[in-house]
Image (cartoon, coloured by chain):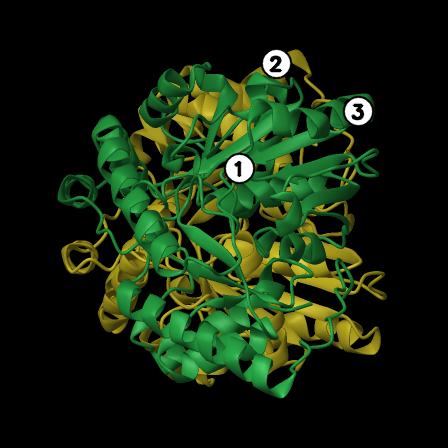
Chain colours: A green, B yellow
Amino acid sequence: MFNVYEFFNRINEVRPESRLDAGQPDIPVRREIIEEAVESLRRGETGYTSTGGIRELRERIAEFEGVSADEVIVAPGAKILIAAEIASAKKVAVVSPRWNAYSLIARQFWREVEVIKTTLDERWIPRVEEIKADLIIINYPNNPTGRVLSGKEIRGLLDVAEENGVKVLSDEVYAELSFTRFTPARELYENVVTVKGFSKLYSMTGFRLGYAIGERNEIRRIQRFIESTVTCVPPFVQRAGVKALELRDELIKEVRRAYLERVRMASKMLRGFDFVEPEGAFYIFLRTPQDGMAFAERLLSRGVAVFPGMAFGDYPNFIRISLSGKGLERGLRVIREELECALESRATEGWEGSSRGVSAEGSR
Amino acid sequence: MFNVYEFFNRINEVRPESRLDAGQPDIPVRREIIEEAVESLRRGETGYTSTGGIRELRERIAEFEGVSADEVIVAPGAKILIAAEIASAKKVAVVSPRWNAYSLIARQFWREVEVIKTTLDERWIPRVEEIKADLIIINYPNNPTGRVLSGKEIRGLLDVAEENGVKVLSDEVYAELSFTRFTPARELYENVVTVKGFSKLYSMTGFRLGYAIGERNEIRRIQRFIESTVTCVPPFVQRAGVKALELRDELIKEVRRAYLERVRMASKMLRGFDFVEPEGAFYIFLRTPQDGMAFAERLLSRGVAVFPGMAFGDYPNFIRISLSGKGLERGLRVIREELECALESRATEGWEGSSRGVSAEGSR
């Protein structure tokens, strides 16, 4: 299986000019959030906290999510919460293309993964008649496609989940960055655990702060997992989270607009090439005229980092362009040049595209 | 299985005057360490880092541990590193009494646990002829007994591990707080993964910072687990760790002396009762004249929090007294009073001790 982290660590060594690879926002963390962490540290808030998170943070999250505080748990990042769910499942289904981590986590816990593949030609809408798993992971607004499914578009999948008694893990880390109406999965189906984080809207990636919403007993079960693996989140990080939530409404407007502008700009610059214009998040999942990995390597040699489609499933002829990194405009220009160049050489040399890669989901 | 975290969360609600329960040191984090985190935050070091830790921190750890940087991995706490090992093992053995978390982690990953029981009467020395597991966890200086085994005392166990081809996970989080000569297990046996942290010597519990030392491929394998569950440690926490290491020699002298004084004071105050005087760490594991849980509950009602022996294995007639919390002297006085009182009522009422609890290791 393609390991995106190995490629990522290599990018870090190369230090390219344009970082259109990771979902590391270049919008800085707001000064108030930093200073809240600083004050907390200086107050000496450096001990353990309750394993589910400090009360104030849980309560504030509960408030705007419209749930009660004991239906919320705080953790060092959304990922460990996803791991908690995968570890407790027997078999996991994922809708593909998707964030590489789901499969990497499943591999760590020796869980089989069933892939429900979607295609660009069907506008990335999942069509499925049966789910052979006890947990299915969905992610809208979607990384890497930027799609936000309408209630009607997601309905089919949720109905099948209900028929098959499958729990849904809804990764909604980009929920606040939807440019269209977004309906949380838990409003459409009962058996849902929602996972969200502070990395995208607040740019707090390195703080490692996420949370899950679910039914009380489910949250208690997740809490057992969290306390058995990481104990708790640093108190000064949780304090920063409380401050971030105070800025939530303001930032939703500001940051969403910023990403929407980038999405429009990028879509315009890449017009004519093959992708769905994003309805949320800050990625473009683009079909390349040739092997996506080779294309990503060539871009890297020109100082532009992107991720190859294989990082998101069996998509050998795609790349994911993140619009959240530095050197965006320059990067997009280089990408357009390379796309045009590849198309041209394909036209003149009769290039037929690379042989399709074989996915090896869940295998070790 | 007794869940120490449930009891711990309850203690947090009761807010007793004397906190002799958790291993949360009351020695404050040094100002320089706090300020390093502050400066890092203000420099905007709030993004992802490489998944194994920043180079500088790995290199400094490698330096004083006498290994190379690629034999070190940094993680949010020692616990997730222990989890990484347990998750990859088929069956786990633990030497008991031991920190409750080993079994709780094993339970999360559905791993069976074989308990190698030691006794106060044998001065907590493990005697074993065969290890029916592929991983054994040892912990010296020991929590909860405070014992530091000599090379001769640990030799037997390591020989059996070698004969049976068993990997040793050596939890050495208290290594710097040994009052006697301490030999790291990896100097005595090849197949060892060592886990250490910043919580005890530096009091950086809430920072969540730990590291593992092992053979390169083993470290790479652990790194896969870390990046699949928590991605990385916050950069400003890692920076604080670098600063802490600069203070290491100074703090070893200062903090070790402080705990040694407490150990001497406590041992003197509790003279005549049943325990081994600690050779390291900051706990006393004491035999109670009656059921340890009932004894802990009575102490809690008098404003003194301790953990019952059952939190550390099948030790129903023990309590663990942590010497690292606030209200120590008062707490020890209350404990002595209650011990005397219990002995007295036992003498007058012919009290025979509680029925022995049944341990249910690894069961769900």
B150 or A325: nearer the eye? A325
Task: Say what amino acid the circle numbered 1 marks.
Answer: Tyr
Name the residue at 29% across, 42% down.
A202
Q: Are marks 2 and 3 in contact (CB under 8 Å)?
A: no
Q: Examine the rendered structure and indicate whether residue B276 appears above or below residue A286.
A: above
- Residue denoted by label 2: B348
Task: Say what amino acid the circle numbered 2 marks.
Answer: Thr
Label 2 secondary element? helix
**Does residue A304 show up?**
yes
Q: Which mark is residue A165?
A: 3
Nearer the camera: disc 2 or disc 1:
1
Q: Examine the rendered structure and indicate whether residue A348 appears above or below residue A45.
A: below
- Where in the figure is residue B316, as x and y percent of width and height? 67, 32
Which image quadrant for residue B128?
A: bottom right
Task: Say what amino acid the circle numbered 3 marks.
Answer: Gly
Q: CA distance from mark 3 to mark 1?
A: 21 Å
